[in-house]
Structure formats: C-alpha cells, structure tokens
Image (cartoon, rainbow, N blue to C red):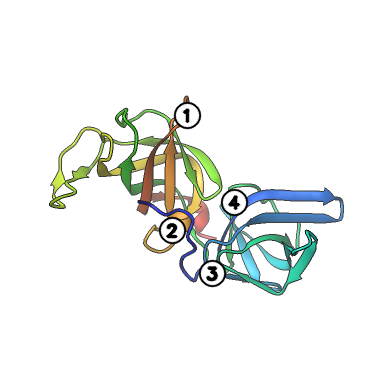
Amino acid sequence: GIDVTEPTGSRLRLPVQSVLRPDSGFRGYAGRIVSGALDVGSSVRVLPSGVVTTVERIVVMDADGGDLDLDTATAGDSVTVCLGSEVDCSRGDVITAADDPAEVADQFQADVVWMHESPMLPGRPYLARIGTSTVGVTLSGPRWRVDVNTGEHLAAETLELNDIGVCNLSFDRPVAFDAYADCRGTGSLIIIDRYTGDTVGAGMIRFALRRSSNIHW
C-alpha cells in the first residue's frame, strides 16, 4: 500500500493544517512535520507563494493541555509555528527551509493505484488530497498499466479495481510537492470522487510535467 503518514526524509516539510488566531496577539500555523527538523530562528519559505520569513516560536501542547515552547521540533511532531512577519499562509501551504524548498507545479506524472469498483474515467474531474491541500484533478488515460506478476508494461485505456498504472495528472492550481521517492508526506496523494466523497485511488508522484513559474524565486 501507499503510506501517506509515516515521516520520511531529512528536508523540512511542514504542511499547514490550520491557522490559529485565538486573540489579536497570537497567530500560529498548525500542522505535523512530515520530514526534517524545524528550529526557532531559522529562515523558512512558505509555498506555493515563496515568501521567506523567520520562525519566532514553536509551540506544542504539554501533558496538562497548556502551551509549551520548544527550541526545535522534528518529523512526527505536531506543532504550531509563529512566524516573524505577517505572511499569506493558509491550510494546504507547506513550510520548508528557505534554502531547500519543495517544487511547485500543477501537472505531474504519477504511479496510480485504482481502489474502486468503478473504473477510472480519464478526463473526469476528481479531487486530490496531497498533504493538507485538496485540489481538483483530472487524470489522463494510462501511459501504461503494470502487470503485477511480471512487471510488464501493458497498453490500457483505463484502470480497473486494483490496477496499477502510470498516468499524467493535472491539478486546478499549483501545489508544493516532492517526488514520492524523496518524501512520502509531500509526494503521495489520494484521489476522491467529488460527487460521492469515496476514495477511489492513490498516487505516488514521479515528477512534474510543467513547473509553476514561481519556483524561480
């Protein structure tokens, strides 16, 4: 199966789950670090916007339900990060090291595992959830389907239940990502039927087909 939760890799990747503003004096960005480490004072980049800022605080909940400040946090930690300037950061954005950002793109080639009795419909609008971001997605007809017994690449017009194939994916907006081989947390996705809400497939990104222009900071 495709593990979309286990922390992997050494490059900082923090998908933002929510923005917390309990009062006018506090603004924090909450999420779970899926890769790397985060330090107070370090320079970070918010994607896909590309804005650079500094980590002022790292806050976690202590055993009594209160706030505890940390100097550093690592993969697997759920944290709230306070940044040094007002930035445009919201759910679905990814916080990375300023000098080691993820890529940003809206078109990808990916390995796709189909998980539903209804076959994949190329060109049909689905939803994709990657990290904490949910975007619209369409899939091309498979470039090939994999024979799971021999590894042979077979011609196919669609993917049926339990089929594995390679498809091109088009998102309706750019997202921050890594190749699945580099970071599972930002390289894996699930595919959702936008009408029923059913999970119908899962994907592992190979590479971008067309990069967003804003990766060239």
Circle 4 or circle 3, nearest the eye: 3
Mark toward the start of the polypeptide (4 vs 2): 4
Q: CA distance from mark 4 to mark 1?
A: 21 Å
Q: CA distance from mark 3 to mark 2?
A: 12 Å
- The residue to which callout 3 is attached is 36
On screen, residue 192 versus residue 42, left or right, reads: left
Q: Is the residue marked by circle 1 packed among few (<14), some (14-19), or many (20+) residues within 10 Å?
A: some
Residue drawn at point x = 67 percent, y = 61 percent: 79
Q: Quadrant of the C terminus?
A: bottom right
Query: What is the three-letter code of the residue carrying label 1?
Result: Arg
Q: CA distance from mark 2 to mark 1?
A: 24 Å
On screen, residue 88 versus residue 75, left or right, reads: right
- The residue to which callout 2 is attached is 184
Place of residue 169 in the rendered image (x, y in percent of width and height, measured from the top left): 37, 41
Residue drawn at point x = 36 percent, y = 62 percent: 181
Mark toward the start of the polypeptide (4 vs 1): 4
Mark toward the start of the polypeptide (3 vs 2): 3
Residue furthest to the front in view is: 64
Question: In front: 42, or 127?
Answer: 127
Query: What is the three-letter code of the residue carrying label 2?
Result: Arg
Place of residue 98 in the rendered image (x, y in percent of width and height, measured from the top left): 59, 67
Q: Residue 71 occupies which quadrant of the picture?
A: bottom right
Place of residue 5 in the rendered image (x, y in percent of width and height, measured from the top left): 49, 55
Q: CA distance from mark 4 to mark 2?
A: 16 Å
Q: Which mark is residue 93?
A: 4
- The residue to which callout 1 is attached is 194
Circle 4 or circle 2, nearest the eye: 2
Residue drawn at point x = 50 percent, y = 57 percent: 215
